[in-house]
C-alpha cells in the first residue's frame, strides 16, 4: 500500500503539491492524470524518497518514507521498480548490462542468476534477442521496453511508470499498454502510471486520479471518471482547450 498523506512540496516560492492525499491499495493500478508541469513526477519521486515533503508524509508498506534511515530506504527501493520518463539508459552499456544494473547491487545474486533474470525480463518485454545490443541501436519504443525490463528484473512489489507512452506513436503506445497489463498479471505488482494519454489510463488502470493545482481533484474508477460532472476533470478528459475557471468548485 502506498499512501500520500496531505503532502505539500514547494521549490522556492513555487508550491507544487499542496495537500496531496492519495491511497494506492495492494493490487491496484492507479493512473495519475494531470496537465504538464503540475507535479505528477514530483509526487512519484516522493514514493522512493528522491524528494522529501515539506509537510505531510508518504507511507509505503507501513514505512514512513521521509524519515527512513538510508539503509532502510535502499531496502524499500529494492521493492520498487521505477520506469523513468526518459528511458534513462546508459548509452555506454549493453541492454543486458542496463537491465541487470539493479541486480548487480544485490550481493546475494550470482552472475548466472543475474543473467537468468535479465533474460527473463527481456523475454517478458518481447526483446529476447536484445541483450547484446547498445541503446543507440534501439528505437524509442524499444528503449521504453528496456526501461520496463530493468524495472521488472527486480521482481518488484511496486511498479511506477512515469509517462510510459509519451512521445510514442499510437501503435507502439498500445504495445506498451499491453506490456503494463502483462506485468500486472505476471508480477501482481501494485502500480502507479503517470500519463496524459487517456487511452493508456482507460486500458491499464482500475482507478484514476487527477492532480490539479497541487491536490487530487477527483479519484474513482474509470467509469466514475468518464461520467464525472466535475468541470475541471471533464475538460481534461474531453481534451477541450478553453480554460475553465481555475478555482471552479468541485461538484458535491
Ligand atoms: N528538483 C526541482 N527543483 C525545482 N523545481 C522543480 C524540481 N522538480 C520539479 N520542479 C518543478 O515542479 C513543477 C512540477 O514538475 P513535474 O512534477 O515534473 O510536472 P509533471 O506533472 O509534468 O510531471 C514544475 O514547475 C517543475 O519545474
Ligand atoms: Mg513528469
Image: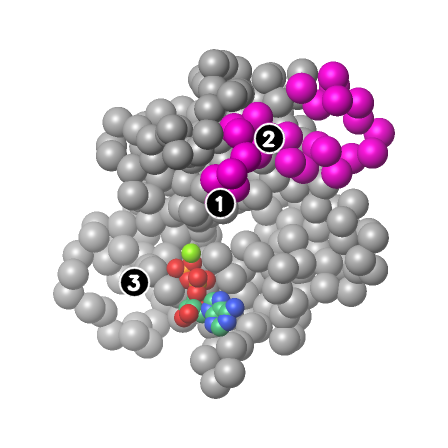
How packed mark 1 is, by other alpha carbons closer than 10 Å (few <14, some 14-19, many 20 or more), is few
At x 63%, y 54%, the residue is 47
Kindly indicate the quadrant of the structure image that contains residue 21: bottom right
Kindly indicate the quadrant of the structure image that contains residue 168: top left
Mark nearer the N terminus (1 vs 3):
1
Label drawn at residue 97: 2
Which residue reaches farthest front?
92
Label drawn at residue 88: 1
Relative horizontal placement of residue 150, taking residue 219 as reference (left or right): right
- Say which of 247 and 129 sits in front: 129
What's the CA distance linking mark 2 and mark 1? 13 Å
Q: Position of residue 126 (x, y in %)?
A: 45, 17
Q: Contact, CB < 8 Å: mark 3 with mark 2? A: no
Q: Is residue 53 above or below residue 114?
A: below
Residue bearing mark 3: 232
Mark nearer the N terminus (3 vs 2):
2
At x 48%, y 40%, the residue is 91
Q: SS for tag 2?
A: helix
Q: SS for tag 3?
A: helix
What's the CA distance linking mark 3 and mark 2? 44 Å
Mark nearer the N terminus (2 vs 1):
1
What's the CA distance linking mark 1 and mark 3? 33 Å
Indicate the colouring scheme. one colour
Q: How many marks?
A: 3
Residues drawn in magenta: 88-115
Q: Contact, CB < 8 Å: mark 2 with mark 1? A: no
- Say which of 26 and 192 sits in front: 192
Q: In which quadrant of this rendering is ligand 1 seen?
A: bottom left
Quadrant location of the N terminus in the rendered image: top right
Which numbered disc, 2 or 1, marks the residue closer to the eye? 2
Q: Position of residue 61 (x, y in %)?
A: 74, 47
Amino acid at each position: 500500500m502506498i499512501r500520500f498523506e496531505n503532502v505539500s512540496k514547494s521549490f522556492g516560492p513555487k508550491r507544487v503539491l499542496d495537500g496531496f492525499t492519495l491511497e494506492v491499495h495492494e493490487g491496484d493500478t492507479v493512473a495519475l492524470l494531470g496537465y504538464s508541469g503540475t507535479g505528477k513526477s514530483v509526487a512519484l519521486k516522493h514514493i522512493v524518497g528522491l524528494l522529501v515533503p515539506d509537510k505531510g508524509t508518504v507511507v509505503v508498506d507501513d514505512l514512513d518514507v521521509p524519515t527512513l534511515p538510508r539503509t532502510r530506504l535502499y531496502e524499500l527501493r529494492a521493492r520498487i521498480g521505477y520506469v523513468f520518463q526518459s528511458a534513462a539508459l546508459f548509452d555506454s552499456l549493453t541492454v543486458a548490462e542496463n537491465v541487470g544494473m539493479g541486480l548487480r547491487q544485490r550481493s546475494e545474486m550470482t552472475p548466472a542468476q543475474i543473467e537468468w533474470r535479465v533474460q527473463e525480463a527481456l523475454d517478458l518485454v518481447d526483446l529476447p534477442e536484445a541483450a547484446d545490443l547498445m541503446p543507440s541501436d534501439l528505437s524509442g519504443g524499444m528503449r521504453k521496453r528496456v526501461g520496463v525490463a530493468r524495472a521488472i528484473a527486480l521482481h518488484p512489489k511496486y511498479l511506477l511508470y512515469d509517462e510510459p507512452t509519451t512521445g510514442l506513436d499510437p501503435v507502439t503506445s498500445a504495445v506498451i499498454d499491453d506490456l503494463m497489463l502483462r506485468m500486472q498479471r505476471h508480477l501482481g505488482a501494485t502500480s502507479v502510471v503517470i500519463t496524459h494519454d487517456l487511452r493508456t489510463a482507460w486500458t491499464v488502470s482500475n482507478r484514476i486520479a487527477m492532480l490539479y493545482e497541487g491536490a487530487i481533484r477527483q479519484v474513482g474508477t474509470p467509469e466514475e471518471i468518464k461520467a464525472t460532472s466535475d468541470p475541471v476533470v471533464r475538460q481534461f478528459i474531453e481534451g477541450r482547450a478553453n480554460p475553465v475557471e481555475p478555482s471552479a468548485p468541485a461538484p458535491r
